[in-house]
Image: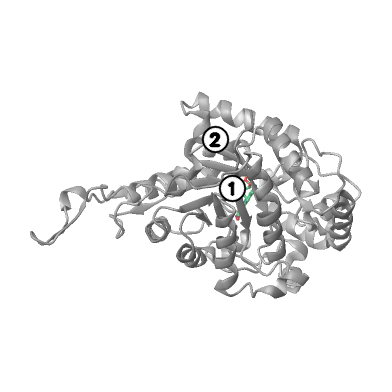
Amino acid sequence: MVKMLHFAWFGAPGAHYWNYPSAGIYDWRKGDLYMDMARLCERAFMDMVLFADIPAVPTTYGDSNDHYVKHGLEVHLDPAPILAMMGGATRHIGLGATLSTSLYPPFLLARMMGTLDHLTSGRSAWNVVTSASASAAQNFGQDALPEHDERYNIADEYLDLVRQLWESWAPDAVLEDRVKNVFADPSKVKPPHFAGKYFKSRGPLTVPALPQKHPVIIMAGTSKRGQEFAVANADMVIAHKNSVQDMRAYSTQLRAQLAAAGRDPASCKIFFSIKPVMGDTPAMAEERWAQNYAKANAESGLSYLSAMIGIDFSTFDQDQSLPPDLPVQGMVGKLLQYTQAKKDMTLREIAKHEGMHETFPICGTPEQVADIIEQTAAEGGADGFHFRVSVGDFQYLAEVTTKLMPILQRRGLARTSYAGTTLRENLFAF
Ligand SMILES: Cc1cc2nc3c(=O)[nH]c(=O)nc-3n(C[C@H](O)[C@H](O)[C@H](O)COP(=O)(O)O)c2cc1C
């Protein structure tokens, strides 16, 4: 039986792709791009648009900002205000922002996400990251990030606090009773007076109970500690995996961990990254793949990898593969991508791969791509996929939403209407 899948559009609202032909259609600094993007994704009945964020221009590669600035890498807008605009331009699609538990004060985040959930009538999502960027920590006044597993300990308490803030107003607290002149029942608004190991916050939130109770909680970490955090907190996970075997291993393990923790394994949706390259014929698709490969800037791929893993790869031997025991304080999951099924790739090949922003190579006509998506979902255990894109590449968005999504819909692999009103309802409708 065909399993209906979920789809998301994922990328950073930034300059990357500034020099590609289709980048000229919109200015990535202006709202039109994002509003039209949300409208197209909604017309294709995707679950959500989700923005990545790292609030820093890195310094990892070559110990300087220069390479990143020169090539427009990690130069991007703050995702949260954009979501508010996109929410005004749409009615159904979910809207997610990446925000860091190591950087944002919890009250600020709880209030901002609560506001977004109200503004969009329950369509907000938060991609919880613990951050891997030392430069980001320095931007926020810290000398360095806490170490990898400790960041997740902090994030656990952070989630506890923001949940208490979101629940500080009971759902029926607001009365707006004009006859009695009572806005809300004070007995139903309880300040958490939270005092933990890492955070203190009085509360209550200035924002009444959210339409979704909590925004949809997304999580992307695939380290052991990251997965434990996901099991405890996530409604949805997004992962980059380079092979169907790695997808299968990850989804099997995560569902077993969810069950062991007493959660329904279906209560956390598993998405994997894809970025199919399509053409009207197989030969045209292959030609585009070859063009993309030739155009991909390996040095940018290497600098991206450096920023994500937190190690300067500019001095590494590019003909060697990555050692699995590298002392990573950044994104362990990124290292795992190249030390599991694809462990024989050399750093040179990895750099090209990252330069293409490629994760799981798919290439073909839209019909062939639909076949691969269906097969990958079945074999890899996916509930859905997020297209990992450069948001300035509007031509690609048009191609996916008008050529690929209709095929998936005809085959019963993608929805043709929104069943619910909130993102959570739509995400868990099947
Ligand atoms: C699909 C995907 C998207 C991610 N987006 C972001 C992001 O926008 N900002 C960020 O700081 N980290 C991002 N990450 C990194 C994760 O939050 C996490 O730090 C990383 O996977 C390493 O976690 P781990 O060490 O637990 O594996 C992303 C990871 C994946 C797989």
- In this view, the residue in front, 383 or 125, is 383
User: Could you tell me residue 428's position as x and y percent?
Assistant: 48, 39
Q: Is mark 2 within 8 Å of ligand 1?
A: no
Q: Is disc 1 placed on a helix, strand or loop?
A: loop
Per the rendering, the mark at residue 147 is 1
- Camera-side residue of 304 and 176: 176
Q: Nearer the viewer, residue 319 or 174?
A: 174
Name the kind of residue labelled 1 in the image.
Glu
Tell me which residue sits at (76%, 42%) in the image: 242
Above-or-below relation of 219 to 206: above
Q: Is residue 129 visible?
A: no
Whether residue 369 sits left or right of residue 315 in the image: it is left
Cβ atoms under marks 1 and 2 closer than 8 Å:
no
Q: Secondary structure at mark 2?
A: helix
Q: Earlier in the sequence, mark 1 or mark 2?
A: 1
Q: Please state if 211 lies on the left or on the right of 98 as rendered.
A: left
Estimate how packed mark 1 is, as few (under 14), some (14 to 19) or many (20 or more) residues with alpha carbons within 10 Å.
Answer: few
- Report x, y in % for residue 285: 84, 53
Indicate whether 22 appears above or below 310. below
Label 2 sits on residue: 228
Residue 422: x and y in percent read 43, 49
Residue 117 visible at all: yes
Locate the N terminus by quadrant: top right
- The residue sitting at the left extreme is 180
The residue that appears at 88% across and 52% down in the rendered structure is 286
